[in-house]
Amino acid sequence: MAGSKVQRATAASFVLAAAGLVGALAGLPTLNSLLKILLRGYPAFDAGQVAKVAVPVYISLAATIVGMVLALLLLNDIRLDRVFTAVNVLRLRLLTYSGFIMVVPYVVGAGLFVTIRIPFIVMAAVTAAFLGVLMYLIRSVMRDTQP
């Protein structure tokens, strides 16, 4: 019973991390266009601000890509029953740091771009929720595989 629960949680975490990685990579080439479309409804938003607004988003996307690669490597090791290793502890630590780096640019952006604060707050909340779900699934898998 516990083995199948671990396998299901590992598979769910793997799918979530892979989806995050694909989403982050897919967003890179179209980011400026997406920002123009999303922020078009804000009357105080100037199309010339897109480059400034894109900086925090690119920083967050870079941290997201690093975090998702780390999560996939960690989950692959868990799937191979290499759970409590020094490398995986380091990966978890780096995944936590990358999660922090994912959210901070949005919080800073909300402070810098007061006229378009709401989109930054929403992006920070969505990013934090995504990372929270991923970390919860990884924690559950690791807890269930304890020796």
Image (cartoon, rainbow, N blue to C red):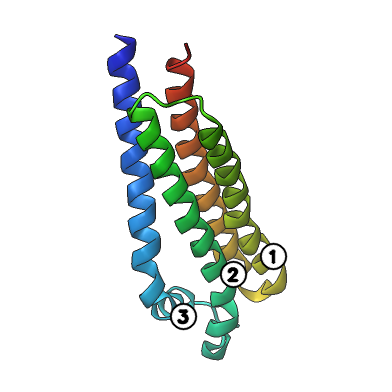
- Above or below for 113 versus 60: below
- Could you tell me if the residues under marks 2 and 1 are in contact, i.e. CB atoms within 8 Å? yes
Q: Residues within 10 Å of mark 1 (few under 14, many from 20)?
A: some
Q: Which numbered disc flags the more N-terminal residue, 2 or 1?
A: 2
Mark 1–mark 3 Cα distance, whole angstroms, equals: 21 Å
- Between the residue at mark 3 and the residue at mark 2, the CA separation in whole angstroms equals 18 Å
- Vertical side of 34 occupied by 19: above or below: above
Front-lying residue, 8 or 83: 83
Residue 136's spot in the image, x, y percent?
A: 49, 31
Residue furthest toward the right?
111
Task: Give me the disc on residue 40.
Answer: 3
Of the residues shown, which amino acid type is indicated by label 1? Val
Which residue in the structure is indicated by mark 1?
A: 108
In space, the residues marked 2 and 1 are separated at their CA atoms by: 8 Å
The answer to whether residue 45 of the structure is visible from this angle is no
How many numbered tags mark residues here? 3
- Residue at left offset 60%, top offset 40%: 93
Circle 3 SS class: loop
Q: Which residue is mark 2?
A: 56
**Badge 3: residue crowd in 10 Å (few <14, some 14–19, many ≥20):** few
Work out whether residue 130 or residue 88 is closer to the camera in this orientation and state it: 88
